[in-house]
Image (tube, rainbow, N blue to C red):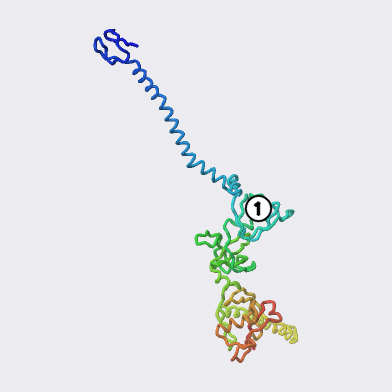
Amino acid sequence: MSQLCASCGAASASDAAFCASCGRALKPKIAAKSLKSAANKGRWSVPFVAIAIVLVVAALYFWLFIADDLKRDADMPATEAGEASNPNAQIFFAITDANLRDKPAINGSVILGKLPRGSQVTGTIQPGSSVDGGWLELSDGNGFVALVNLSQNQPPVLVKSLNDQPWVADGFIDVWATTLSDSVLLDRLREGAQLTLVGTTADNFIEVKLADGRFGYLADAPSILARLGGKPITIGFNPQTCGFSGEIGAEFAKLSGQLRTQWQALEAKEFANESARQKAYAAVEGKSKFLRLRRSFEGLSLTGIAQHYESQSLYFDDAPAKVMDVFRAQGFAIGRDGLFTGTDLYAGIAATRGEGAAYGKSELGCGV
């Protein structure tokens, strides 16, 4: 097949590059067609490359983010999945052994089981009465737990139980939310506040239950345990003279003053006759003046003092043997019978009797 020259019109072979008549360059149709195909092919390759890039980026994003989340959701325990689906779910710990109930109420509910101290539970808070303080409905559907038995802080292990011993704060005292160094201050109590001592921890804190049902921790457990009998007091005592000094001496002076006032009133009173006067004096003469105290002395609980007609007494809420040991440790010479040695007056420690039994278990008495 021949091709025509565009310049002179002469025919030349189909594969000739130049015109055989005039020598002009020829443009074979096959070359033009080839160039047109390459151009078309270039125009179609651009969209395909863009689509491929988008697919690669999408696959990379899925692999880096979505696939990992899907795997984490698949591995999530049922309880965590419940929390994720319920944004109001909260985590609590049992601060004491607690009952699991079928209803959020104490009355009319059935106990389903026990929640041991330290157990972690998840659920949503349900309102309650002023008595129970609200409830936690467990996310796993296993019942309800009273909020008074729960804390959002995991409780420490108690190394010694104090058996819910009541204690009256003997001054300002801080109550912490946990035993950790970064704990928040839960409350600051004044002197006279009522607390219930639950137990001691390994790091020398005392777990306490406050009057409103909350739990907290007091630092310096040894110091508090030494003050369980009350605010510390110093007892200055001279068995040779039956004299007491310091704060105790001041309290005895008040009692003695009250007795003197009573005698002076009798002396100034007009009686019908001498017999009536003697009868009134006899009624007062054998009476004692008592004062209740709540103080601690070297681990002892001083519970009261009394001014008698010719003697004085201290009362302790401890056994006589323990009281003797403490006073011996203070340097006093005390025989096995409880008597202070080397005195002309009576001075001794014994079990209480008579009126004194209402003020303590032991009596340190001194006098004629």
Is residue 259 in sight in this rendering? Answer: no
Quadrant location of the N terminus in the rendered image: top left
Q: Position of residue 338 (x, y in %)?
A: 63, 86
Image-quadrant location for residue 43: top left
> In the image, what residue occupies the spot 72% across and 83% down?
283
- Closer to the camera, 166 or 3? 3
- Closer to the camera, 100 or 261? 100
30 shown above or below 95? above
Q: Which residue is mark 1?
A: 135
286 shown above or below 103? below
> In the image, what residue occupies the spot 50% across and 62% down?
181
Is 13 displayed left or right of 200 in the figure? left
Total labels: the figure holds 1
Is residue 28 in sight in this rendering? Answer: yes
Image-quadrant location for residue 237: bottom right
55 shown above or below 131? above
Q: Position of residue 69 (x, y in %)?
A: 52, 43
Is 115 displayed left or right of 40 in the figure? right
> In the image, what residue occupies the spot 24% across and 12% down?
23
Quadrant location of the C terminus in the rendered image: bottom right
Dot 1, how many residues are within 10 Å of its Cα: few (below 14), some (14-19), or many (20+)? many
- Closer to the camera, 343 or 227? 227
Q: Residue furthest top?
A: 9
- Closer to the camera, 41 or 321? 41
11 shown above or below 216? above
Image-quadrant location for residue 251: bottom right
Q: Position of residue 334 (x, y in %)?
A: 60, 87
Q: Position of residue 242 (x, y in %)?
A: 60, 86
Label 1: element kind: strand
Label 1 is placed on what type of residue? Trp
Q: Residue furthest left?
A: 22
